[in-house]
Image (cartoon, rainbow, N blue to C red):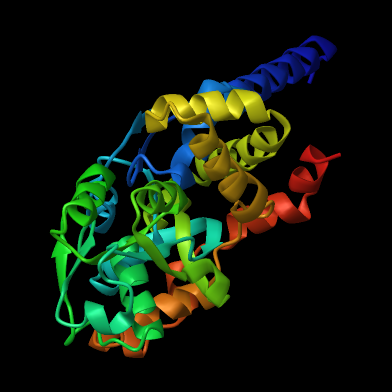
Amino acid sequence: MTLRSYFLNCLLVAVLMSTSAGAQDKIRVGFGSLASSHMVLLVAKEFGLFEKYHLEAEIVGNIPGAKSVVPLMSGDAQIIHAAGPPFVLGTLAGGDVTMFMGLINTMPFYLVGHKDSATPAQLRGKKMGVSTLGSASDFALRFGLVKLGLDPDKEVTTLALGDSGVRLAALNNGTIQAGAYNLGETVFLKQQGHKQLVDLALTGVEFQHAAVATTRSMVTRNRRALVNYAKVIIDAIRQMKARKEESIKIMAKYLRLGDRQAVEMQYDENVNKLYLKKPYPTLTGIKTILDGVARNEKAKNAKPEDFVELGIVRELDESGFIDGLYR
């Protein structure tokens, strides 16, 4: 090889490496609902973090919790943010689904009863409300009722009511007598005179609440995009901690809340208490879900490891990427 050919080859390799490093993968990302637990995704968009990590992301949202697995199954989205139960149920049904990040690994719900239903005994035989059957609010409601000594299958009627506004109105007007609500919803309901019956986060149970899922075929086909996506979300969590005022303004915009105190409470709960610095999915929290759907025959023999891809967060952890963000 002549000296000239050698330098031309080196130049070609350098150009190809540069092009690869700067290439942008196109992805479509969906999320379950306009809840505070999903705000990290929208903050990442506002902070320009997708471009920083070489991704071109289209974000589509407000997919009812129990149906959040559908876009993955159909190929309409490559990544979904939602609670763990629909992803677990989707996998049990034979779907190509795997969770590769666990942003919140506890149960941040409150069981709230109507002002006229002060005791568990008064809930017996009454109507409860959730977003959709099989959603996180459904799972949390069932878990909370058991804590109160009630059988969610036999002693109450559960109604699938839809989004937050409908469920809030249903408790306010007495259509339902209890439901599982997030912090912001619970603060509002308590202001209306309704009663917090159980703080489910204080039970200490691990639960795969805010998860990020993809398909195993996507892991094989374009792992690079998933690694870069994990970088986006991990960096967004770090930046939310450091840029409080900007984050609160973004949350207020997307949550459509004008009450500064209500938004700040949700910021503090999610960013300072719940979001994980190293967002591994929780195997124990997935077992909690499997135990809760034990009536499903396939769940009885399933292992939590069947539902997750731990390697992506592990790569970023062991490489020092995550710790490096916080230095």
Q: Taking 257 as reference, is 103 left or right?
A: right
Estimate the x, y position of residue 259 in percent, counting from the top left: 46, 30
Q: Residue at x 73, y 13 (%)?
A: 8
Image location of residue 312, percent across then percent down:
60, 54
Image quadrant where residue 215 sits: bottom left
In the visual, does 255 lie left or right of 105? Answer: left
**Closer to the camera in the image, 301 or 245:** 245
Res 94 → quadrant: bottom left
Write down the quadrant of residue 310 in the picture. Answer: bottom right
Of 308 and 179, which appears nearest the observer?
179
| Number of marks present in the image shown | 0
- Residue at left 46%, top 80%? 287
Q: Indicate the position of residue 96 as horizontal and vertical percent values.
A: 32, 61
For the point 29% across and 50% down, the residue is: 72
Q: Which quadrant holds the N terminus?
A: top right
Outermost residue, top direction? 4
Q: Which quadrant is home to the C terminus?
A: top right
Q: Is residue 3 left or right of residue 78?
A: right
Is residue 117 shown above or below 136?
Answer: below
Query: Is 217 situated left or right of 42 in this image?
Result: left
Q: Residue at x 25, y 40 (%)?
A: 76
Looking at the image, which is closer to me, 236 or 166? Answer: 166
Q: Is residue 231 visible?
A: yes
- Residue 54 seen in the figure: no
Give the x, y percent position of residue 183.
46, 52
Q: Looking at the image, is 186 positioned above or below residue 24?
A: below
